[in-house]
């Protein structure tokens, strides 16, 4: 089966920086709904469109096609007293770019430095500003279910939505059985 709109694609990948240094290698394939549903980067979809299981390719994405350019305005210095103990470099917090802005998506801020009375937070994605190389290998292609098309994402390799046993509603458990989602 060829990769086309409304197919579910399983792809093994290796992610490296532009110098070839390995950043991540998939233990489980990335599974996404193909066809512009934001399940992976558009350049990856473009490269895989019309291909079949077994297809392999390598491509480089510039920052604008991956996690964006590094934005120094997303670095904030905050009072140390605003944060819980213990506080360590690498911890993450959710917030908006500027307090009080409405209609702005919240960002994940990573603590990059801790001083006695100040904390430096970076709202950029850790891979922002980097050109990235992807080595891709298509593992499986199947027709998406009606539910997947309606929900605009793959529900897992077998097409079943993963249910949280504590929920009465059918809610998907993020990341479970679907591999990483590259946004």
Image: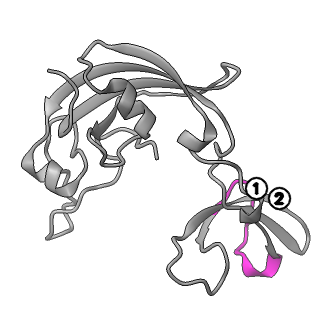
Question: Taking 171 as reference, is 24 above or below it?
Answer: above
Q: Which residue is drawn at 23% across and 44% down?
A: 154
Q: Which residue is drawn at 15% across and 69% down?
A: 169
Q: Closest to the observer: 183 or 29? A: 183
Magenta stretch prevailing secondary structure:
loop
Question: Taking 69 as reference, is 45 above or below it?
Answer: above
Find out whether the residues at labels 2 and 1 contact each other: C-beta distance under 8 Å.
Answer: yes
Residue 152, numbered label = none
Disc 1 crowd rating (10 Å Cα; few below 14, some 14-19, many 20+) is few
Q: Closest to the observer: 104 or 118? A: 104
Residue 134 percent across, percent down from the top left: 51, 25
Q: Closest to the observer: 171 or 15? A: 15
The segment highlighted magenta reads 79-92
Q: Does the magenta stretch include residue 131?
A: no
Residue that mark 1 sits on: 89
Mark 1, secondary structure of its residue: loop
Residue that mark 2 sits on: 113
| Quarter occupied by residue 62 | top right
Marks 2 and 1, how far apart at CA = 6 Å
């Amino acid at each position: 089966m060829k990769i086309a709109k409304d197919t579910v694609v399983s792809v093994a990948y290796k992610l490296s920086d532009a110098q070839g240094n390995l950043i991540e290698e998939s233990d489980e394939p990335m599974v996404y709904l193909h066809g512009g549903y934001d399940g992976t980067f558009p350049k990856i979809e473009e490269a895989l469109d019309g291909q079949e299981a077994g297809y392999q390719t390598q491509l480089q994405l510039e920052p604008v096609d991956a996690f964006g350019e590094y934005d120094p305005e997303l670095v904030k210095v905050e009072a140390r007293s605003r944060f819980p103990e213990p506080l360590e470099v690498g911890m993450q917090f959710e917030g908006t770019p500027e307090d009080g802005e409405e209609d702005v998506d919240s960002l994940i801020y990573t603590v990059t430095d801790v001083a006695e009375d100040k904390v430096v937070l970076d709202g950029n994605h850790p891979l922002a500003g980097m050109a990235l190389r992807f080595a891709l290998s298509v593992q499986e292609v199947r027709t998406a279910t009606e539910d997947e098309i309606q929900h605009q994402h793959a529900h897992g390799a077998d097409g079943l939505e993963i249910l949280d046993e504590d929920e009465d509603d059918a809610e998907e458990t993020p990341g479970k059985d679907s591999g990483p989602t590259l946004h």
